[in-house]
Amino acid sequence: MEAVSRRRGGGIFESLYKVVMRRNSVYVTFVIAGAFLGERAVDYGVHELWEANNVGKRYEDIPVLGQRQSE
């Protein structure tokens, strides 16, 4: 009896299966979109970490690098 009530209630994995993995086209779209968004998030995080660790050492931080002073 307990097993039957547990199966009817469902869970997060069963809900995920019903929404995403029931059709192959939806699953493939979910995987591709997740990979794209994950790549963008990792790229943004690594870029911000690199910028924070290299403040004052970047080319943009040097005020007048190789420029002639205007008369």
Image: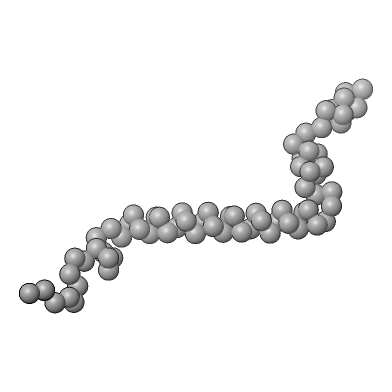
Residue 40: image x %, image y %? Answer: 54, 57
Quarter of the view holding residue 3: top right
Residue furthest to the top in view is 1
Q: Nearer the viewer, residue 51 or 6?
A: 51
Residue 50: image x %, image y %? Answer: 38, 59
The residue located at (17%, 75%) in the rendering is 67
Q: Quadrant of the N terminus?
A: top right
Q: Quadrant of the C terminus?
A: bottom left
The residue located at (42%, 59%) in the rendering is 47
Query: Is residue 46 toward the left or the right of residue 24 in the image?
Result: left
Residue furthest to the left in view is 71
The residue located at (18%, 77%) in the rendering is 66
Quarter of the view holding residue 29: bottom right
Residue 18: image x %, image y %? Answer: 82, 42
Query: Is residue 49 toward the left or the right of residue 42 in the image?
Result: left
Q: Which of 65 and 53 is in front in this view?
A: 65
Residue 6: image x %, image y %? Answer: 84, 27
**Can you say whether 22 is above or below 51 in the image?**
above
Q: Nearer the viewer, residue 17 or 37?
A: 37
Identify the image's colour scheme: rainbow, by chain, secondary structure or one colour. one colour
Q: Report the number of numbered marks.
A: 0
Query: Is residue 56 toward the left or the right of residue 29 in the image?
Result: left
**Can you say whether 11 is above or below 23 in the image?**
above
The residue located at (78%, 38%) in the rendering is 15
